[in-house]
Image: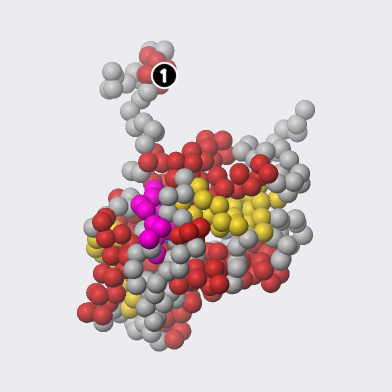
Amino acid sequence: MADKPAIRSTTGRGKLFQSILDTVGDTPTIRINNLAPDHVTIYVKAEFFNPASSVKDRLALNIIEEAERTGALSPGQTVIEASSGNTGIGLAMVCAQKGYPLVVIMPESFSVERRKLMRMLGAKVVLTPRAEKAYGAYRKAVELAEAKGWFLAHQFETKANADIHESTTGREIVNDFADARLDWFVTGFGTGGTLVGVARVLRRERPEIRIVLSEPANAQMIGSGIEQRRTPDGAPLVSHSAWEPHPIEGWAPDFIPLVLQEGIDSRFYDEVIPIAGAEGVKWARALAQKEGILTGISGGSTFGVARQIADRAPAGSVILCMLPDTGERYLSSPLFETIEDEMTAEERDLSRSTPSAQYAAGD
Ligand code: PMP
């Protein structure tokens, strides 16, 4: 019989944090216990432990602090960015703490809770039409930045993006697996910052680790092999021809970002595995219901790919999968479509099965 668990105790982090910004990073790597096949071990890196609940807190903080270091951003200057939500939310947290006004440009297609979170954190949110895709939001941000003299965060092009993943995310992985086997690292891409920053470290320090890049099955820009056309400064010139609308929010904008181009040119991944949005939703629900791990559709999609690798991996293999954000960011999205807010028939039966505090609504 298994040992009964002892009462748990904790000791605190041993320091007083001077700002919310000091809590960014150092996210835990967590073992999967119920959803991995018996012959392999899967770990997830849970980025929803960041203070604004996504991997993009890292980049948001570094973009602003890099601009402060170089003088590109002056005190009180307005910051502007085009974002599918998580970068906007991360920037809103950083700008609130540091006192910069923030304007986020976002296509209307992303979940409404994203807009509300940014506004709650003090940012302004300017929506762009769904038909104009991520590229349209990007153009709008460039235009407004030029017209108003605002600081454009440039997440898709800036060096500050992959650099912070090299000095934090990648470093954390290498340290957490210092004495442990790791065979595969699995990630998707939005800007490509996570892939490029982590891969710089792994290729250098753990070259035996295979890196898998995933993208939506109906928007295989990398799989197509078709190059992105760019302006001389690396920005996209047109929407990529292999792109189609997909439900994996935060993944694959309708162009291959310059940040990701370094990953393509440096062969920072060994394999590209596509996954359908519906599979990602399925695995995000499974992670919630079988592991108690609440992540978004991109996390579910990355996990779905990790599971495919697990099925064919030799016994004893170890796989690490990125979970970029929290499932709470998707209450109005297909992820929660089948989750009721009224009582189900079974719950009503339970309510009626004893006399007190019966709730009649929904009958
Ligand atoms: N998943 C979600 C939900 C995201 O918001 C993002 C970033 N847009 C990613 C994955 C991908 O991260 P990266 O930009 O580092 O490639």
Q: Alpha-carbon neighbours of circle 1 within 10 Å: few (<14), some, or many (≥20)?
A: few
Please say whether residue 56 is one of the residues in the magenta stretch: no
Part of the protein shown in magenta:
241-255
Q: Residue at the spot x=71%, y=65% of the render?
A: 206
Amino acid type shown at disc 1: Glu
Give the residue at mark 1: 346
Q: Nearer the viewer, residue 133 or 198?
A: 133
Q: Is mark 1 within 8 Å of ligand 1?
A: no
Q: Quadrant of residue 339?
A: top left
Residue 325, position in %: x, y?
A: 47, 53
Identified at 27% across, 22% down, the residue is 361
The question of residue 250 being in magenta is answered with: yes
Q: Quadrant of the C terminus?
A: top left
| Residue at image coords 76%, 44% | 315
For the image, the number of numbered tags is 1
Report if residue 52 is visible in the image.
no
Query: x and y percent of residue 266 in the render?
Result: 59, 72
For the residue pair 274 and 192, the one nearer the viewer reads as 274
In this view, the residue in front, 19 or 47, is 47
Left or right: residue 189 versus residue 174 is: left
Residue depicted at x 71% and y 66%: 207
The picture places residue 277, in percent across and down from the top left corner, at 44, 45
- Please indicate, yes or no, whether residue 151 appears anywhere in the rendered image: yes
